[in-house]
Amino acid sequence: MRAGAPWVFSNELTMSAAARALAPGSLVQLEGDDGKALGLGTFNPNSLIAVRLFDCAVDEKIDETFLAGRLARALALRESLYDRPFYRLIHAEADGLPGLVIDRYGDVCVVQIATAGMERLLEPLLAALRATVRPESIMLRADMPARALEGLDSYVRTIDGETPHRVAVEENGARYFADPAAGQKTGWYYDQRDNRAFVAELARARTMLDAFCHSGGFAIAAARAGAADVTGIDSSAPALALAQDAAAANGVQARCRFLHADVFEEFERLGAKNERFDVVAADPPPFVRARKDLEPGAKAYRKLARLATMVTAKNGIVFLASCSHNMPAERFASECAIGIQRTGRKARLIRAAGAAPDHPVHPMLPETAYLKALVYALD
Ligand code: SAH
């Protein structure tokens, strides 16, 4: 067990018959071989990560008051970071609540539960959320693939209020739209907030290509910053419809167009037609979903870096990101470097960043630093 880390793997535990018989998600006290209490957590005998610790005193009670305390701490941090109530409120282990993600869209909170432990705490959690944040509507997105590893089924449910099919998102002064009920994840990717602002500034008066644009995160930010012409590409028609509406809401629709296409195919096509863009952002879905996908995933990142560079104009900027927590930062950087190099272009790395601060990293759990974002200035 890594000291201070909130995960204990099943092969690190000696389980009594009584422990083995516990229902998945039960609250447990973890003890050392000497019987000394090490921490409180939730236990799932069916999961590789058998115990998830709460990072609290061993005599604490895990109840509504405890959960409300964690929510209040997380809320205070976000309120110190942002003027407006649009952010990731809870980022799982890093906010002391393993298995829980909450994204906030003003009066709407979208809750993602990934573990049996958090699922069992759902009622006190919802009570704590109502008391702390007072949202008008709470949406439960319990449909992440990771739930299968915990033996959980998949469902989506509106808990309080109306089902929010479309919410407005405010970020960096821009207005976007998200669909928390049916969109990807909770509907919006807050993690790229600072990277969007950085790339947008570089796109002023230049042409920009936002590959994997989803609902226009980078594209609209660039257009608002004064980009001359912005193209977004995504394979999801519903996500693109929201991007189009965001362009109109920000008054930049005349300088934005969105293409429903496969990015790899479109890159090849643009490359062959000799079309180039001054700024290219490529923020793809995770290519390394499981550790066994590392090699094919690494190849895909390398290829993407090569193709994105190929369609970047002389003296242009290329932004490359990976949200795979199974892709180590050094490996991602080296795949990007090789991909760029294969085009014969020279590049300078001008920014290496992670997720925005509403996605904190647990200091003892490097897995929580999942987002890697690199910005290169090309010759
Ligand atoms: N850049 C976005 C987030 C991207 S998430 C933002 O700032 O919000 C990844 C996106 O890639 C999703 O919207 C998904 O629909 C899209 N996608 C996945 N595979 C794709 C492919 N092969 N071609 C185009 N889009 C793809």
Image (spheres, rainbow, N blue to C red):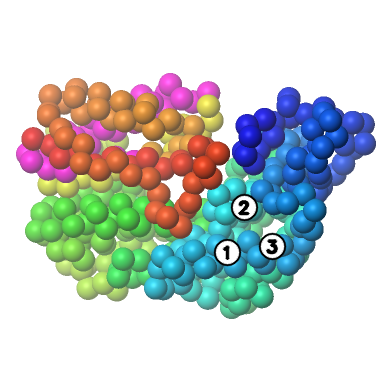
Measured in 3D between alpha carbons, the distance from the residue under mark 3 to the one under mark 1, in whole angstroms, is 10 Å
Q: Quadrant of the C terminus?
A: top left
For the residue pair 159 and 325, the one nearer the viewer reads as 325
The question of residue 205 being in magenta is answered with no
- Give whichever of discs 2 and 3 has the lower sequence position: 3
The question of residue 320 being in magenta is answered with yes
Quarter location, residue 330: top left
Tag 2 near tag 1, CB within 8 Å: yes
Residue hosting label 1: 73
**Label placed on residue 96:** 2
**Residue segment shown in magenta:** 292-321
- Residue 371 horizontal/vertical position (percent): 41, 43
User: Secondary structure beneath disc 1?
Assistant: helix
For the residue pair 218 and 377, the one nearer the viewer reads as 377
- Residue 119 horizontal/vertical position (percent): 73, 53
Q: Amino acid at mark 2?
A: Gly
Q: Amino acid at mark 3?
A: Leu
- Residue at 74 percent across and 66 percent down: it is 64
- Give whichever of discs 3 and 1 has the lower sequence position: 3
User: Secondary structure beneath disc 3?
Assistant: helix
Number of disc labels: 3
Q: Is 17 situated left or right of 73 in this image?
A: right
